[in-house]
């Protein structure tokens, strides 16, 4: 599963995207646990920890809103991590 980070999530993750080779049917919850398992303990200076940012994020699966964190994902799915954006 390809995970793409945007804005504050990108800054906290330290990468724009990364691949997580998890089995078919893995839930978003499990994917996020895998994401956090490979993170360095301290985020870059002036950046909130990714774990805290993920609590406020919205997620897209293949450009469609993913609202059920227990839904099974496909191995070729692209997951976009979108923190809240300000502005109009």
Image: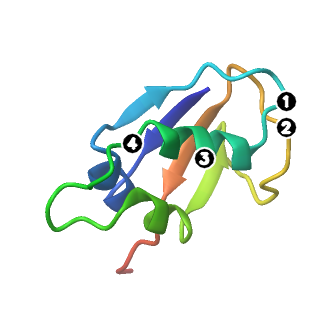
Q: Which mark is residue 54?
A: none
Q: Is residue 42 left or right of residue 49?
A: left
Residue 59 appears at what percent x and percent y?
62, 54
Q: Earlier in the sequence, mark 4 or mark 2?
A: 4
Gap in angstroms between the C-alphas marked 4 and 2: 23 Å
- Helix, strand or loop at label 2? It is loop
- First of labels 3, 4 by sequence position: 3
Q: Is residue 72 left or right of residue 7?
A: right
Q: Position of residue 56 (x, y in %)?
A: 54, 71
User: Label for residue 72?
Assistant: 2
On residue 25, which mark appears? 1
Q: Which residue appears at 78% of the width and 33% of the height? A: 26
Q: Which residue is mark 4?
A: 39
Q: Which quadrant would the C terminus be assigned to in this image?
A: bottom left
Q: Are marks 1 and 2 in contact (CB under 8 Å)?
A: yes
Between 79 and 55, the one lying in front of the other is 55
Q: CA distance from mark 4 to mark 1?
A: 23 Å
Residue displayed at 71% across by 42% down: 30
State the image coordinates of residue 81 (x, y, percent, origin top left): 51, 51
Compute the Cα span from label 3 to label 4: 11 Å
Mark 3 / mark 2, whichever is N-terminal:
3
Q: Nearer the viewer, residue 14 or 43?
A: 43
In the image, taking residue 67 as reference, residue 79 lies left or right, namely left
Q: CA distance from mark 1 to mark 2?
A: 4 Å
Cα distance between the residues tagged 3 and 2: 13 Å
Mark 4 surroundings: few (<14), some (14-19) or many (≥20) residues within 10 A? some
Label 2 environment density (alpha carbons within 10 Å; few <14, some 14–19, many ≥20): some
The outermost residue toward the left is 45
Residue 6 lies left or right of residue 35; in this view the side is left
Mark 3, residue position: 32
Q: Residue at x 40, y 33 (%)?
A: 17
Can residue 43 be seen by looking at this rendering?
yes
């Amino acid at each position: 599963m390809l995970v793409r980070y945007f804005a504050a999530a990108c800054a906290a993750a330290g990468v724009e995207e990364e691949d997580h080779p998890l089995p078919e049917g893995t839930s978003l919850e499990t994917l996020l646990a895998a994401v956090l398992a490979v993170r360095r303990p301290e985020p870059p200076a002036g950046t909130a920890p990714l774990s805290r940012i993920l609590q406020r994020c919205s997620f897209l699966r293949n450009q469609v809103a993913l609202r059920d964190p227990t839904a099974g994902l496909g191995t070729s799915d692209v997951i976009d991590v979108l923190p809240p954006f300000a502005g109009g």
